[in-house]
Image (cartoon, rainbow, N blue to C red):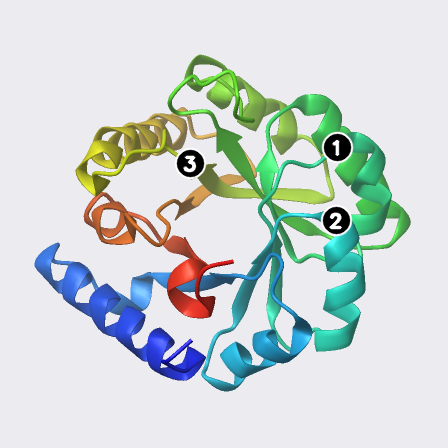
Amino acid sequence: MPESIASNILEIRNRIDAAARRSGRDPQSIRLMAVSKTVPAERIREAQDAGIKLFGENYVQEAREKIPAVGHDVEWHMIGHLQTNKVKYVVNLFDWIHSVDRLELAQELDKRARQHSRKLKVLIEVNIGGEASKSGVEISHACELARQVSVLPDLCVHGLMTMPPYSDDPEHSRPYFRALRALRDEITRAAIAGVSMDELSMGMTDDFEIAIDEGATIIRVGRAIFGAR
């Protein structure tokens, strides 16, 4: 790849700043996550050296090999679908779980976190487009799931995550991002004890500027940092 990871990150940060200013937002309110699935540890360290503090992994087995090699000087976020039987492996690896989409999973995360004396930060994953091929709770059930998770003592709900239906046109993502923001506002109004809606994890390489327009606080960028997989 002709450009370095560091120069790619600089370009993305410049785009984040420009998008935030266009939207009247503080660029510091938006965190850049490097999606590092299939990326070897040495390239992750390059991104870390270039200032990346958040890394997102999709696959438990891969993360079990890479995270110990890279270390915990950064935040590790589980962003992929999580099977309940894999939870025992993730509680000591990840700081955040973005993919809580059912009560059974949340209960297992809570149980395992307690066994390891950990508090896990979690996001409720919402299937914003209602796609059968994607994980995530339906919009209509998201507030109730947040309420159910709120009583689990070792999980802390911090917001929502989504992935809109794929399109070649980034603008097609806008109504889905807007819907997630509206859902965040609805859950905020419900004033559920122990639930904060500070984070909206949405937007990837092709549509993160649109996501920033619509209120994203964490954007998940892989290809634009590390190149095509």
**Is residue 31 in view from this perspective?**
yes
| Mark 1, residue position | 83
Image side of residue 101 versus residue 51, left or right: right
Image side of residue 215 versus residue 88, left or right: left
**Is residue 71 in view from this perspective?**
no
- Quarter-of-image position of residue 69: bottom right
How far is mark 1 from mark 2, CA to CA?
9 Å
| Mark 2, residue position | 60
Are the two marked residues, 1 and 3, in contact with CB atoms closer than 8 angstroms? Answer: no
Q: Which quadrant is home to the N terminus? A: bottom left
* Label 3 element class: loop
Q: Residues within 10 Å of mark 2 (few under 14, many from 20)?
A: many
Are the two marked residues, 1 and 2, in contact with CB atoms closer than 8 angstroms? Answer: yes
* Label 2 element class: helix
Q: Which mark is residue 163?
A: 3
Q: Nearer the viewer, residue 128 or 26?
A: 128
Are the two marked residues, 2 and 3, in contact with CB atoms closer than 8 angstroms? Answer: no
- Amino acid under label 2? Val
Q: Residue furthest front?
A: 2
State the image coordinates of residue 147 (x, y, percent, origin top left).
Answer: 56, 24
- Amino acid under label 1? Gln
Q: Which residue does the image show at 69% across and 37% down from the upper left? A: 82
Q: Which residue does the image show at 53% across and 21% down from the upper left? A: 133
Q: Nearer the viewer, residue 110 or 228?
A: 228
Q: Which residue does the image show at 27% across and 46% down from the upper left? A: 211
- Amino acid under label 3? Met
